[in-house]
Amino acid sequence: MTQIRLTRRHALAGGAALTGAAALGGTASAQQGGRVVVGTWGGDYSRLIQKNIDAPFLKSKGVEVVYDEASDAPRRAKMQAEGRLPRGTSDIQALSAAQMFEMNAAGLLAPIDYAQIPLASHILPAMKYPYGIGHIYSAKVAVYNPKLVAEPKSFKEAFDPKHGNKLGFIDIQYQFVMLAAALANGGSVSNFEPGKEVLLAAKKAGARMYPTNEAFAAALKAEEIHSGIMWKARVVQWQNAGISVESSAPSEGVPFYISGFCIPKNAPNKAGAHAFLNAMLEKQAQENFAIDMGYNATVDNAQVAADLNKRIGFTPDEQKRLVDLDYGYIAKNDAAMKEWWDKVFKA
């Protein structure tokens, strides 16, 4: 597997395992069964959780996984609304690393008790936080249909207004779209403002907006659009589905993406939540996610075929351009970013 060489900003990595089984209400071995409510995105991700984690590793242990499917914004809002309650409605939440940082900063997450997770010793250091665990990782790249347009070597080329209505954006990925646009115009992970000029120019030229990753993929397949940005992992998934699409690691930097799981502070079944986290780290589960979804594994014992690793991973030169996010900046500015995206860019 491609190894991660980045250090985590704002003390995210948290190398030491946190203790606290008493505070978390028992051990996974004592209470590993029962009902576990998982808040997650719908579509492919939810389906593959059921296929690769739930069915093979949890059902036999008496764990009933119930899925609360929605995009992350309403799920985060629900966590905030339930924050003062002694008992929430979810046991596990699937969020990006930036969103886990935000929820933890708001005091809404329980510490992970790594003593309850036998497979924790295999977690890559950069994927192990005091309040969550990285499940899969990839990075944001330019995507394009090689039959219709030349390879964009940068985000600046990918967002060029010359693409007109053949350029597409994904609504639920507003944070990363704004970051990529910022990098295209001299901004940074700590300053997204320069990206607004780039996005408004693309909008004026006719760029299209799609609500979900799946809708964007359908537009690529139909050749309604030929360019955009996306996780490299999704490109592999779309190629497997027969879509004419390639990826290009932008010269300005390749923003890192981690999707992980965390436990709400008032989760009803914390022991079941830890059992879910352990199942997520199973070698077979991690390998199958790499095959099915094209994301890199977050454990050190996963074995991925060399040809697949070449497609989903990053070359040594591309690794040098991997850009870690400033999660503190995103958390502080997320509300204002979303307001601009909805009221100005999408208006």
Image (spheres, rainbow, N blue to C red):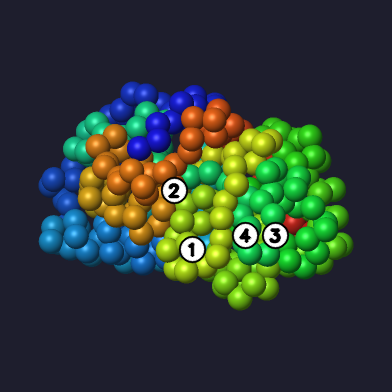
For the residues labelled 3 and 2, the Cα–Cα distance comes to 21 Å
Q: Nearer the viewer, residue 49 or 243?
A: 243
Q: Residues within 10 Å of mark 1 (few under 14, many from 20)?
A: many
Q: Which amino acid does label 1 sit on?
A: Trp
Dot 2 or dot 4: first in sequence order is 4
Secondary structure at numbered mark 1: helix
Q: Is there a contact, CB below 8 Å, between mark 3 and mark 4?
A: yes
Residue 149's mark? 3
Q: Is mark 4 on a helix, strand or loop?
A: loop
Residue type marked 4: Pro
Amino acid at dot 2: Arg
- C-alpha distance separating marks 2 and 4: 16 Å
Q: Upstream in the sequence, badge 4 or badge 1?
A: 4
On the image, numbered disc 1 is attached to which residue?
238
Quarter of the picture holding the C terminus: bottom right
Q: Look at 68% across and 68% down and name the residue there.
A: 225
Q: Is residue 19 left or right of residue 39?
A: left
Of callouts 1 and 2, the N-terminal one: 1
Residue mark closest to the camera, 2 vs 4: 4
Q: Do the residues labelled 3 and 2 touch (CB within 8 Å)?
A: no
Separation of disc 1 and disc 2 at Cα? 12 Å
Residue under pointer 2 = 311
For the question of whether residue 324 can be seen, the reply is no
Judge by depth and name the residue closer to the eye, 8 or 20.
Answer: 8
For the residue marked with disc 3, what is the amino acid?
Answer: Val
Residue 290 shown left or right of residue 236 in the figure: left
Establish if 112 lies above or below 199: above
Tag 1 and tag 2, C-beta contact below 8 Å: no
Label 4: which residue?
146
The residue furthest bottom is 222
Q: Which residue is drawn at 27% across and 59% down?
A: 52
x, y percent for residue 97: 50, 42
